[in-house]
Image (tube, helix red, strand yellow):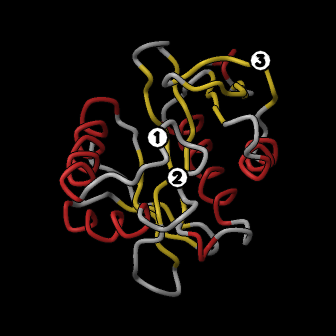
């Protein structure tokens, strides 16, 4: 299955390409963008290229992954959003990261909602989690707005996190 392109009212979620690595690298180097991640040190360009390549492979293996996110009004990468399989826990996570210039505009919510809808409606995934740093209030609000409910405090990627969960309302039919 090839990576689908999804359009929301303000965004285009499209497949990543290796050409996106340099733009993503610049986003990750912006102070504060990685503040609530396990490592707040920005990765070098080689690591970002490998990250993009892993996402391309993740789509091939799982039929889902991260999309490159760009605004409909402008063709430029502003971040990523989508679903990620976590082999350590056998869970599927919704995640998102946007350039600082696009924070506070509801775009993370819009892109994450599209990812949840895709996972439930197109793939029939039974449940999706969200994990967030306990101090990252804005990201917690995004998860709540798209229907995830707080479950517990847990550790992911070596970091203390809040775990949220949403269950596919049609999962009993799947």
**Residue in the foreground of this view, choosing between 101 and 55:** 101
Name above or below for residue 60 compared with residue 21.
above
Give the Cα distance between marks 1 and 3: 22 Å
Question: Could you tell me residue 52's position as x and y percent?
Answer: 27, 51
Mark found first going from the N terminus, 1 or 3: 1
Give the Cα distance between marks 2 and 1: 7 Å
Residue plotted at (74% across, 50% down) = 142
Q: Residues within 10 Å of mark 1 (few under 14, many from 20)?
A: few
**Residue in the foreground of this view, choosing between 5 and 41:** 41
Residue plotted at (23% across, 59% down) = 45
Q: Label 1 belongs to which residue?
A: 39
Q: Is residue 86 left or right of residue 97?
A: left
Question: Could you tell me residue 146's position as x and y percent?
Answer: 75, 45
Quadrant containing the N terminus is top left
Q: Secondary structure at mark 1?
A: loop
Q: Secondary structure at mark 3?
A: strand
Q: Residues within 10 Å of mark 2 (few under 14, many from 20)?
A: some
Give the Cα distance between marks 3 and 2: 23 Å
Q: Residues within 10 Å of mark 3 (few under 14, many from 20)?
A: few
Q: Secondary structure at mark 2?
A: loop
Q: Label 2 belongs to which residue?
A: 34
Mark found first going from the N terminus, 2 or 1: 2
Residue plotted at (76% across, 41% down) = 135
Name above or below for residue 64 compared with residue 80.
above
Which quarter of the picture shows residue 44?
Answer: bottom left
Residues at badges 2 and 1 in contact (C-beta under 8 Å)? yes
Q: Is residue 5 left or right of residue 104?
A: left
Q: Label 3 belongs to which residue?
A: 152
Name above or below for residue 95 compared with residue 171.
below
Select label 1 or label 3 by which is in front: 1
Which quarter of the picture shows residue 126?
Answer: top right
């Amino acid at each position: 299955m090839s990576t689908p392109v999804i359009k929301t009212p303000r965004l285009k979620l499209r497949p990543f390409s290796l050409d996106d690595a340099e733009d993503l690298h610049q986003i990750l180097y912006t102070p504060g963008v990685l503040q609530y991640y396990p490592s707040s040190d920005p990765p070098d360009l080689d690591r970002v290229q490998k990250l993009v390549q892993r996402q391309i492979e993740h789509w091939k293996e799982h039929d889902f992954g991260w999309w490159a996110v760009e605004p409909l009004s402008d063709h430029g990468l502003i971040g990523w959003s989508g679903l990620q399989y976590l082999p350590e826990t056998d869970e599927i996570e919704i995640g998102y990261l946007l350039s600082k210039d696009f924070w506070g505009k509801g775009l993370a919510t819009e892109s994450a909602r599209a990812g949840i809808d895709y996972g439930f409606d197109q793939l029939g995934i039974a449940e999706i989690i969200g994990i967030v740093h306990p101090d990252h209030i804005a990201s917690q609000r995004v998860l709540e707005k798209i229907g995830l409910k707080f479950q517990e405090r847990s550790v992911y990627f070596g970091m203390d996190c809040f775990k949220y969960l949403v269950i596919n309302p049609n999962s009993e039919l799947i």
